[in-house]
Amino acid sequence: MKIPIIGICDTNANPDLVNYPIPANDDSEKTINLLLTKIEESLQGLKSDVKTEVKNEKQALKDGESDPKKEEIKATSPQATARSEGHREDK
């Protein structure tokens, strides 16, 4: 499934077994708490960024701007291609 593996690797671990090794003491509760706090902060920042992007897209749609992704899909659909080539769409 090619799921990337992130792992805390100290001196007794083989970092070649993980895709993204984090060099740290995996036996220390303080280290684990620090790493989890930093990961949580990063995820909260991403969540905030996504919410802002969605809000901006919704506002743009309300203001009458078209969604470029939807326009691209419409333009390349088989029905649009058939219409542009003068073919009738049978149903």
Image (cartoon, rainbow, N blue to C red):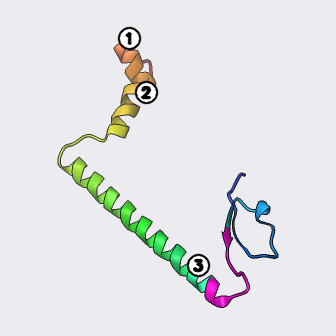
The residue range painted magenta reads: 22-31
| Quadrant the C terminus occupies | top left
Position of residue 7 in the picture relative to residue 40 (left or right):
right
C-alpha separation, residue under disc 1 versus residue under disc 3 = 58 Å
Report which residue position mark 3 lands on. Answer: 35
Q: Residue at x 70, y 81 (%)?
A: 25
Q: Which residue is mark 1?
A: 85
Q: Amino acid at mark 2?
A: Ser
Q: Residue at x 37, y 67 (%)?
A: 48
Q: As shown in the figure, which amino acid type bears the numbered disc 1?
A: Glu
Relative to the observer, which residue lies in front, 69 or 74? 69
Vertical placement of 66 versus 16: above or below?
A: above
Q: Which of the 4 image quadrants contains residue 78?
A: top left
In primary-sequence order, the first of circles 2 and 1 is 2
Question: Residue furthest toward the top?
Answer: 86
- Up/down of 15 relative to 28, above or below: above
Count of labels in the image: 3
Q: Residues within 10 Å of mark 1 (few under 14, many from 20)?
A: few
Label 2 and label 1: CA atoms lie apart by 12 Å
Amino acid type shown at disc 3: Leu
- Residue 47 is situated, as x and y percent measured from the top left of the image, at 42, 67
Using the rendered view, name the quadrant where residue 31 is placed: bottom right
Q: Is 56 positioned to the left or the right of 38 in the image?
A: left
- Asked whether 87 or 62 is in front, the reply is 62
* Disc 2 + disc 1, Cβ < 8 Å: no
* Residue at the spot of label 2: 77
Q: First in sequence: mark 1 or mark 3? A: 3
Tag of residue 21:
none
Asked whether disc 1 touches disc 3, contact meaning CB atoms under 8 Å apart, the reply is: no
- Alpha-carbon distance for marks 3 and 2? 46 Å
